[in-house]
Amino acid sequence: MKPRRILPYYHPSTVIFVDDNERFLDSFTLLLSERLAVRCFSSTSAALSFINDNAARPPLDKRCVSFLGAQHRPGGTLRLDLALVEQEISNPDRFSDISVVVVDYDMPEMSGLDFCQAINSRRVKKVLLTGVGDEKVAVRAFNDGLIDRFLTKNDPQIQAKINQTIDDLQRRHFEDISSLIQSTLEMKSPEFLLEDEFIFLFQSLIQQYDIVEYYYVEDPNGFLMVSHQGELYRLIVVTESQADEQIFSVRKYNPPQEVINSLKSHRSIIWLCEQPDENDESGSFDWNEYVHKAHTFQGSKPWLYTLVENPPADIEYSEGESSYSAHLKAIDQQG
């Protein structure tokens, strides 16, 4: 089975549940993953205001992609500011972006279908919860594109289905909001992003390091990755020829011979996130901080990669305050 492509960026987002029956809301949310950011509403008017106010904030693609020249004329080109993609990690509201709404069909103030029609953002994915007798209405709404999924409340497999549905739709939400970034990036992105071998590697790193958000970065190419608890990682990927070029770029700084040897043998990748003074004779520059163990994967060509823990980052970020774990704790405290 071909793996799903890697998105330019991804971070956890919020799911809204709407049902006039508060007891049902309380019991239903117990079926959900503990790592899901959830907001529950028993009032449709309050829920709509909350969702549509959230949708008024410009999404990332509107902020980092701009048009040079006339947008709708031949010759108009797109400009992608990748620095803004990386800086999204310092956006305190990123986890509050609403990706999925789960709404009951039968409510006194407003039906679930009317509620879905009143949502301003087309990027918010909609799930309708129905009774057994409402399935025909739900099927018609799905075929008309008004909702993205529907589930029956008394389905014995509802716990597995609702969690899988939310996971799938959150992915689709990010596919939608990053499509413009993706198409612009593909014009110049390195080949490894499309390599199945890299995609499998990327997925394994996400599992191993409990990564919940990531952002594509350049110079060098790779990803800024963040774990559930907020630890930062920098994934760097280079070709063998790019690794060889690193040797020439650092020779002018007179690095120790063992550094040159490890680069020549492709045992290491160097990332000079700050420049040593040229011809530094004091020996105060610690080269070990910038030389990282290299690993390999074989795609259409050999690639080298390294994962740097706690990398320097030119962004405002506090591990304790900005992590997804901290966000979930804040939601729990708000009740």
Image (spheres, rainbow, N blue to C red):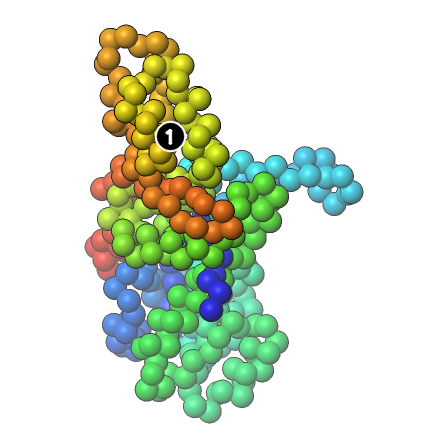
| Residue 93 place in picture, x, y as percent | 38, 46
- What residue do we see at 51% from left, 72% from top? 148
Q: Is residue 9 above or below residue 317?
A: below
What residue is rendered at 43% in x and 44% in y? 303
Task: Name the image quarter holding residue 141.
Answer: bottom right
Would you place residue 14 above or below residue 262 in this image? below
How packed is label 1: few (under 14 Cα within 10 Å), some, or many (20 or more)? some
Disc 1 marks a residue whose amino acid type is Lys
> Residue beneath label 1, please?
264
**x then y, percent, for residue 127:** 46, 72
Residue 227 visible in image: yes
In front here: 84 or 52? 84
User: Is residue 43 shown above or below 187?
Assistant: below
Q: Which residue is at the front of the view, 15 or 255?
A: 255
Residue shown at the point (23%, 14%) measured from the top left: 284
Farthest residue to the bottom: give it. Answer: 133
**Does residue 278 appear to the left or right of 78 in the view shown?**
left
Viewer-proximal residue among 250 and 10: 250
Task: Kindly give the residue lying farthest to the right in the view shown.
Answer: 74
Q: Nearer the viewer, residue 309 or 58?
A: 309
**Residue 118, horizontal then vertical, whole percent:** 54, 66
Q: Percent from the top left, x then y, of residue 173?
A: 49, 60
Q: Which quarter of the rendering shows the C terminus?
A: bottom left
SS for callout 1: helix
Left or right, 120 with reference to 283: right
